[in-house]
């Protein structure tokens, strides 16, 4: 596969992130109203602007495009630059602190490790931005895992935060390979393949737990078992995201609707699910009006000129 083809795959995953991100962001509001929109499959009035999820994914994508790898110093520098371009993109408090202190000249290694009383972050921020790595290196899972770890470590040093990034990157790689090789697997096989590549962590355990959760379960039951990202932690976000993607690998549109139906951290969950499932969905199953409506990551001010 040529370098340009790999870049195109990574860019496609970035597009999936941006659509899911902007779509999910549209569903923050009064709960009953949002549930009505979900039941009726109508999208609330929205600007289709993406959040920090996509802004940070752009920097990961550009590392692949420029370096074919992840240069951690360059990556965190790009995170800082893009944060300063628009601080109102939904960054969490910990991310703001890390990016501010690094921007003031601090060592990202010390700052990232120092948060949460030296435990490092187990938030979902490293998971939401990592899909382009899986798309780019879809045929080399060891490389995918290596770069997922590097991309996470600049802000998330806790093993749970890192595990979430590995899980999403691996899931994207598997989805990409399935589409390119015209293959299909069951949701159980997909989840099992992802879990088998992960460290022994709470996140891995909860992803394995999702193997026993039927798609027919009421969404409130699924939330009780797998979480919905409301705690903003990997363990509360990634297991559902992988489960949702696994059951909708060939249907991007359905995947995104299912992602927001659990409410919680709906932009991040939809971004993760979008970055995975766009890679394994036929082009005619990706709503053209969504593609055309969302803010374009490639022409945004966050792309290096």
Image: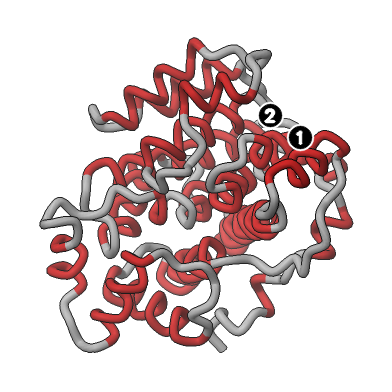
Q: In this view, does 202 lie to the left or right of 247?
A: left
- Residue 57 appears in the picture as rendered: yes
**What is the x, y in percent for residue 150?**
29, 57
Relative to 43, residue 243 above or below: above
The quadrant holding residue 163 is: top left
Where disc 2 sits, the SS reads loop
Query: In front here: 170 or 220?
Result: 220
Query: In front here: 260 or 78?
Result: 260
Where disc 1 sits, the SS reads helix
> Which residue shows up at 64% across the image and 46% down it?
274
Q: In this view, does 23 lie to the left or right of 169?
A: right
Labels 1 & 2 near each other (Cβ < 8 A): yes
**What is the x, y in percent for residue 78?**
40, 78
Residue 124's disc is none
Q: Residues within 10 Å of mark 2 (few under 14, many from 20)?
A: many
Query: In front here: 33 or 131?
Result: 33
**What is the x, y in percent for residue 217?**
63, 14
Residue 254's disc is 1
Q: Mark 2 points at which residue?
A: 248
> Which residue shows up at 58% across the image and 62% down it?
7
């Amino acid at each position: 596969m040529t370098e340009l083809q790999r870049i195109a795959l990574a860019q496609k995953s970035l597009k999936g992130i941006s659509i899911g991100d902007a779509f999910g962001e549209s569903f923050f509001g009064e709960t009953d109203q949002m549930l009505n929109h979900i039941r009726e499959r109508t999208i609330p009035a929205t600007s289709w602007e993406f959040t920090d999820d996509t802004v940070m994914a752009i920097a990961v994508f550009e590392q692949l495009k420029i370096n074919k790898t992840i240069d951690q110093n360059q990556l965190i520098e790009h995170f800082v630059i893009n944060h300063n371009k628009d601080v109102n993109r939904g960054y969490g408090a910990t991310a703001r602190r890390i990016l501010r202190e690094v921007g003031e000249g601090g060592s990202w290694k010390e700052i990232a490790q120092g948060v949460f009383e030296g435990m490092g972050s187990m938030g979902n921020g490293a998971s939401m931005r990592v899909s382009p790595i899986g798309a780019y290196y879809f045929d080399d899972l060891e490389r995918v895992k290596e770069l997922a770890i590097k991309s996470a470590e600049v802000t998330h040093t806790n093993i749970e935060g890192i595990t979430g990034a590995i899980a999403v990157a691996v899931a994207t790689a598997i989805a990409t390979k399935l589409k390119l090789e015209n293959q299909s697997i069951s949701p159980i096989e997909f989840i099992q393949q992802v879990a088998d590549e992960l460290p022994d962590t709470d996140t891995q355990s909860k992803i394995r737990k999702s193997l026993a959760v039927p798609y027919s379960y009421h969404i409130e039951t699924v939330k009780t078992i797998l979480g919905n990202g409301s705690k903003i932690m990997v363990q509360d976000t990634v297991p559902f995201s992988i489960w949702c993607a696994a059951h909708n690998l060939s249907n991007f549109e359905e995947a995104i609707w299912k992602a927001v139906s659990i409410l919680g951290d709906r932009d991040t969950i939809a971004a993760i699910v979008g970055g995975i499932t766009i890679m394994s969905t036929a082009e005619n199953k990706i709503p053209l009006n969504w593609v055309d409506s969302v803010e374009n990551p490639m022409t945004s001010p966050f792309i290096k000129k």
